[in-house]
Image (cartoon, rainbow, N blue to C red):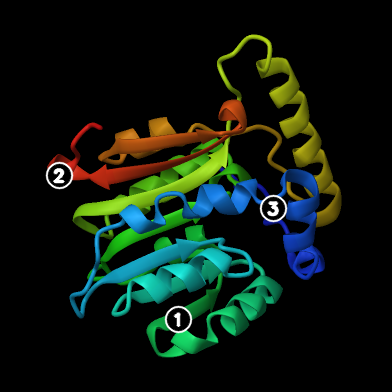
Amino acid sequence: MTSAPSPNFNHIARIYRWAEYLTLGPLLQKARTHYLADLPTLEMECGKALVLGDGDGRFLARLLAQQTRLQALAIDSSDAMLGLLRRRCRSYSDRLEALHRSALEFFGSCPEDYYVDLIVTHFFLDCLTQPELDRLAGHLAAHTRPGALWLLSDFAIPSNPWLAPLAALYIRFLYLVFRLLTGLRVTHLPDPASALSVAGFHRIARHNLLCGILYTEIWQRGDYATGR
């Protein structure tokens, strides 16, 4: 199956943070960091995090500050975003590798013995089609250790019948804007829950913001999930 053309976020990299604040204030960053303090400390030398599409690195800088021995690999298809991320995380450059590449391309060819303990995808999965997300989740599951965590944040259509039409209209508007600015061809939200479940992950925590239009979740691989 042919993938949608990769969007180009270079043109909006420098204004992304301020555009985010103008539209939703601090809510996206609150979603990213809501569970940050709840993550277990990955103090072992081999502790690895994979961060996909973190934009300018605001979340990653806080993660590396909290997890003082964690090694992180940040992957982004935008070299401009990666430049901002590197500058923001320069205090942790000895524990950070930033790779300018598509996540799907990387995991289609990465070494078999590459394993991570934590995956982070904040407002990234909504840039994928469902087949792409299904494929990515399968790749990631093959490169995680038992008990690995997946922290994600994204948009959703809430179940409230009064809010659902407004949320759908707002999300459709966001997709249109990003299509005009970046060439993003995705037009509707994929279903991360189905992809992660099939890949062997179990949701252990969820927090809604803005009446459920935004959410953040923690998923865990294998039998370590508690089902909270």
Above or below, comparing residue 115 to residue 124 in the picture: below
Q: Give whichever of 218, 135 is nearer the camera.
A: 218
The structure residue drawn at horizontal position 84% and vertical position 54%, both measured from the top left corner, is 181
Nearest to the eye among marks 1 and 3: give it: 1
Q: Amino acid at mark 1?
A: Glu
Please report whichever mark, 1 or 3, sits nearer to the chain's N-terminal start: 3
Locate residue 166 relative to residue 198 in the image: left or right: right
Tell me the CA gap for discs 2 and 3: 37 Å
The structure residue drawn at horizontal position 51% and vertical position 45%, both measured from the top left corner, is 153
Q: Amino acid at mark 2?
A: Tyr
Tell me the CA gap for discs 1 and 2: 28 Å
Q: Can you name the residue that lies furthest to the right here?
A: 180
Disc 1 marks which residue?
97
Quadrant in which the C terminus is drawn: top left
Q: Amino acid at mark 3?
A: Pro
Above or below, comparing residue 112 to residue 28 in the picture: below
Please report whichever mark, 1 or 2, sits nearer to the chain's N-terminal start: 1
Disc 2 marks which residue?
224
Tell me the CA gap for discs 1 and 3: 25 Å
> Would you say residue 173 is visible in this rendering?
yes
Helix, strand or loop status at disc 1? strand
Instruction: Count up the numbered dots.
Output: 3
Disc 3 marks which residue?
5
- Pinpoint residue 225: horizontal percent, then vertical percent: 19, 40
Above or below, comparing residue 181 to residue 86 in the picture: above
Could you classify mark 1 by the number of other residues whose Cα lies within 10 Å: few (under 14), some (14-19), or many (20 or more)? some
- Pinpoint residue 49: horizontal percent, then vertical percent: 35, 67
Helix, strand or loop status at disc 2? helix
The structure residue drawn at horizontal position 62% and vertical position 64%, both measured from the top left corner, is 55
Label ID, residue 87? none
